[in-house]
């Protein structure tokens, strides 16, 4: 007979109950499986914390101010109009300088040119990327190539109008000379003159090519992790209503988050959706991980017996 959503079956002289929605409970797994899943949850938890730290490190000063705020997300996904003072200009590193600094995405490509290439380009960028020094060699040490030559040798293979980085070109083709007007868009800390005390500037969002590159691994990996953890969460002995609410939240949050990365570009209000979806995912995903761990080792058995 059925009662309260449970199936009660007679087994000899005993009555047992099973929940038809839970064919197996985590606590019933053998110990090796529990150890394996525990290690998986630990790695997943640490990995998520590292990803949060990575978001903070990459976005926290996107609006030219320390700390992660909505303005940082607004600049990254929509673009931001900001009042910039001369002091901010003097202390803001150029995008190219960030890329070629130790740990930057483009550092490995610059290092292929050897120590002189690293020395020339970083020193030129740190000096504010003056146009007069763009074609001058012998700085900072005698025999050093000019910054234009370093960029030609190490950068324009991809950073040209027909290359893989066509959205950030430094030259028209991979066989032509780098143009200062193109290089300056990433070599200068901020566009515009530096003599004004305060100026309104437009901080452009992430380029389309880079946004595609970022979306690609996220849209393939995160839903899979959400599916695995969500499936394990449904095997816990928690109340059905709680699982019905919390179970789908991480997957739904991922859909809203990734979709809003693109929708925020033309429609600024979706920046708030990005922030909200990220918070919901973190809370719900963390709760699922903790519930799965607790159910593995401290949950109640899936079959209860009563004396006949």
Image: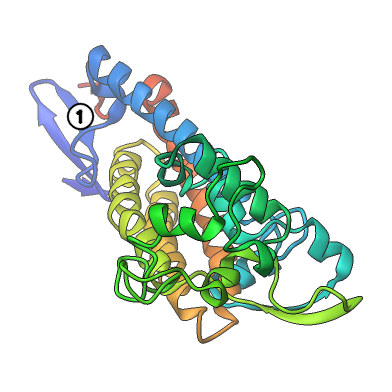
Q: Residue placed farthest to the bottom in the image?
A: 266
Q: Quadrant of residue 82?
A: bottom right
Visual colour scheme: rainbow
Q: For this rendering, which residue is in front, 161 or 255?
A: 161
Element assignment for label 1: strand
Visible residue check, residue 256: yes
* Residue 104 at x, y percent in the picture: 52, 45
Q: For this rendering, which residue is in front, 17 or 238?
A: 238
Q: Residue placed farthest to the top in the image?
A: 31
Visible residue check, residue 283: no
For residue 265, above or below residue 223: below
- Give the residue at x 37% y 66%: 165
For residue 46, above or below residue 197: above
The residue that disc 1 covers is 16
- Give the residue at x 55% y 45%: 54
* Residue 246 at x, y percent in the picture: 44, 53
* Residue 248 at x, y percent in the picture: 37, 57
- Give the residue at x 34% y 42%: 229
């Amino acid at each position: 007979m059925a009662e309260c959503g449970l199936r009660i079956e007679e087994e000899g002289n005993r009555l047992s109950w099973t929940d038809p929605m839970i064919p197996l409970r985590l606590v019933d797994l053998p110990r090796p499986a529990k150890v394996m899943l525990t290690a998986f949850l630990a790695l997943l938890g640490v990995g998520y914390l590292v990803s949060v730290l990575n978001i903070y490190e990459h976005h926290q000063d996107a609006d030219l101010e320390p700390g992660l705020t909505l303005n940082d997300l607004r600049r990254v996904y929509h673009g931001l109009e900001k009042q910039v003072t001369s002091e901010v200009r003097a202390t803001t590193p150029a995008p190219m300088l960030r890329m070629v600094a130790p740990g930057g995405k483009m550092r490995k490509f610059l290092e292929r040119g050897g120590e002189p290439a690293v020395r020339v380009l970083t020193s030129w960028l740190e000096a504010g990327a003056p146009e007069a020094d763009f074609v001058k060699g012998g700085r900072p040490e005698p025999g050093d190539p000019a910054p234009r030559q370093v960029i030609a040798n190490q950068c324009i293979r991809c950073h040209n109008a027909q290359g893989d980085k066509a959205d950030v070109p430094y030259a028209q083709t991979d066989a032509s000379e780098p143009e200062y007007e193109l290089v300056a868009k990433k070599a200068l800390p901020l566009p515009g003159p530096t003599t004004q005390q305060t100026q309104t500037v437009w901080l452009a969002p992430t380029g389309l090519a880079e946004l595609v590159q970022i979306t690609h691994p996220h849209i393939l990996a995160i839903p899979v992790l959400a599916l695995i953890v969500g499936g394990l969460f449904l095997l816990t002995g928690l109340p059905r209503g709680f699982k019905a609410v919390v179970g789908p939240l991480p997957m739904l949050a991922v859909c809203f988050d990734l979709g809003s990365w693109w929708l925020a570009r033309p429609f600024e209000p979706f920046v708030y959706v990005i922030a909200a979806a990220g918070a919901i995912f973190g809370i719900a995903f963390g709760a699922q991980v903790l519930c799965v761990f607790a159910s593995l080792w401290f949950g109640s058995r899936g079959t209860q017996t009563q004396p006949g």
